[in-house]
Image (tube, rainbow, N blue to C red):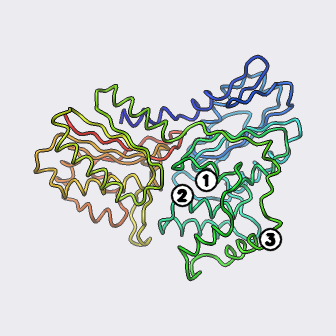
């Protein structure tokens, strides 16, 4: 946990923003850009994401009180309910319930206020936009002809059938007024600076929070291709969605006009690589031989990733730990989970599913009977939220193994029902941190050796 927490601390949202924004010698410095204070009249701050409260807190710390007053600082950020805090002069808006990563009517209301604020910017006004993972569900603004409940049902359908984050965001962008550069298109002021914390593997800026300030690299045709993959008979997705995408495809006047490109700059300030490096440094400080890996592409299903991690642990434990002391494997990524039918489904998240799959592989290898050194395997979401649960993830070790045997549980049954939460709840393996106010995918830590 100490190693995993080092990863989270390194990408704390307030710290990342404070490192990239400062006021000095009559100038506002933002990610290498220098803006004379007398060159703008008003500063607007907007944002959305699981880390948006933390990012805002860091920004307000970086701005002197006199600037906040002189530049009439105002703004609005959309966050999950459990991330709401008082950050005057901004409005921090609860745009969805905690643990339910889906758009709501409250989210639409907040998104409309954000678009209004951005759209009111004058030629001598600047805007700072703060975006992080979770922003897609927190900035809902369906295009004409599509109802919120239809869009929500679509994203739920795609998620339940294993769609990855890039597929989800490709579809979401085409059905939104905010996503796919939509927010930037509303801005006609002097300059919009967007600070971004990435929760997408490879850090494609157009995919993080569905790219509200980034020209889209995909279009309606790509979205239709994804729907054709998951709904080939057009039986499960609302007709209105197909009609809206087809209209966008046919209407050439709706093609992207990047008129605001010179007035918008996007800056990545934190990602998974930063977190993994910090975890590795902490592991080395504690005396472990550390090996790291950071996913550069989509990982696939959580069960396969978990079994692969267990294989690495077995290999290190059998052959290397005896000769080279304790070994720590730190990795980062974000797998997907194939969900069973709702009436069979239990409770869990991708990290819990991954660790349970790894645990089953360790049991298959006879970890209880072979000569094997002490071990520990942990996987947690850096946002403190794993699926629709109050846990960040799960951990297994020798004590978990003992509890499991005493309770005589069937781990395969829990795995097949997507019910890892209740398995780990029983054996004492849940990790509960509450909101961390950051979000850079998942970090895994595996230790073997005395």
Check disc 1 and report its element: helix, strand or loop: loop
What residue lies at 42% left-to-right and 72% top-to-bottom?
343
Residue picked out by circle 3: 251
Tell me if residue 162 can be seen.
Answer: yes
Q: Position of residue 375 (x, y in %)?
A: 23, 42
Q: Position of residue 200 (x, y in %)?
A: 54, 50
Marks 3 and 2, how far apart at CA: 27 Å
What residue lies at 69% left-to-right and 41% top-to-bottom?
194
Rendered image quadrant of residue 23: top right
* Relative horizontal placement of residue 371, taking residue 383 as reference (left or right): left
* Relative horizontal placement of residue 369, taking residue 395 as reference (left or right): left
Q: Which mark is residue 165?
A: 2
Marks 3 and 1, how far apart at CA: 24 Å
Check disc 2 and report its element: helix, strand or loop: helix
Q: Residues within 10 Å of mark 3 (few under 14, many from 20)?
A: few
Marks 2 and 1, how far apart at CA: 8 Å
Residue picked out by circle 1: 207
* Relative horizontal placement of residue 228, taking residue 21 as reference (left or right): left
Rendered image quadrant of residue 63: top right
Which is more N-terminal, label 2 or label 3?
2
């Amino acid at each position: 946990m100490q190693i995993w927490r080092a990863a989270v601390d390194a990408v704390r949202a307030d710290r990342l923003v404070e490192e990239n924004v400062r006021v000095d010698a009559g100038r506002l410095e933002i990610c290498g850009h220098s803006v004379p204070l007398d060159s703008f009249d008003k500063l607007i701050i907007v944002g959305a994401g699981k880390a948006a409260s933390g990012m805002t807190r860091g920004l307000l710390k970086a701005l002197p009180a006199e600037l906040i007053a002189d530049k009439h600082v105002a703004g609005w950020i959309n966050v999950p309910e459990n991330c709401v805090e008082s950050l005057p002069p901004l409005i921090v808006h609860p745009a969805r319930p905690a643990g339910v990563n889906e758009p709501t009517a409250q989210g639409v209301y907040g998104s409309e206020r954000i678009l209004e604020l951005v759209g009111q910017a004058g030629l001598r006004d600047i805007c700072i936009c703060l975006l992080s993972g979770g922003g897609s569900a927190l900035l809902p603004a369906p295009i004409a002809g599509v109802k919120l409940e239809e869009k929500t049902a679509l994203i739920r359908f795609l998620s339940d059938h294993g769609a990855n984050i890039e597929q989800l965001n490709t579809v979401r962008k085409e059905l939104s007024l905010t996503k796919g550069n939509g927010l930037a298109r509303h801005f006609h002021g002097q300059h919009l600076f967007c600070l971004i914390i990435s929760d997408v593997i490879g850090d494609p800026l157009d995919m993080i929070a569905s790219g509200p300030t980034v020209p889209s690299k995909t279009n309606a045709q790509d979205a239709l291709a994804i729907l054709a993959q998951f709904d080939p008979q057009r039986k499960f997705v609302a007709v209105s969605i197909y009609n809206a995408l087809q209209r966008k495809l046919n209407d050439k006047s709706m093609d992207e006009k990047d008129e605001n490109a010179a007035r918008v700059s996007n800056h990545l300030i934190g990602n998974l690589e930063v977190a993994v490096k910090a975890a590795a440094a902490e592991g080395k400080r504690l005396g472990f031989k550390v090996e790291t890996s950071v996913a550069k592409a989509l990982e696939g299903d959580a069960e396969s990733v978990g079994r692969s991690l267990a294989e690495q642990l077995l290999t290190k434990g059998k052959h290397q730990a005896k000769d080279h002391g304790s070994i720590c494997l730190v990795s980062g990524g974000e797998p997907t989970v194939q969900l069973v039918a709702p009436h069979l489904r239990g409770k869990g998240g991708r990290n819990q599913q991954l660790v349970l799959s790894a645990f089953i592989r360790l049991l298959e290898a006879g970890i209880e009977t072979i000569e094997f050194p002490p071990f520990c395997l942990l996987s947690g979401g850096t946002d403190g939220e794993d699926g629709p649960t109050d846990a960040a993830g799960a951990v297994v070790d020798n004590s978990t193994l003992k509890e499991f045997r005493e309770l005589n549980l069937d781990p395969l049954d829990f795995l097949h029902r997507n019910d890892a939460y209740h398995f780990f709840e029983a054996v004492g393996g849940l990790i509960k941190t509450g909101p961390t106010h950051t979000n850079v995918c998942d970090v895994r830590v595996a230790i073997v050796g005395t």
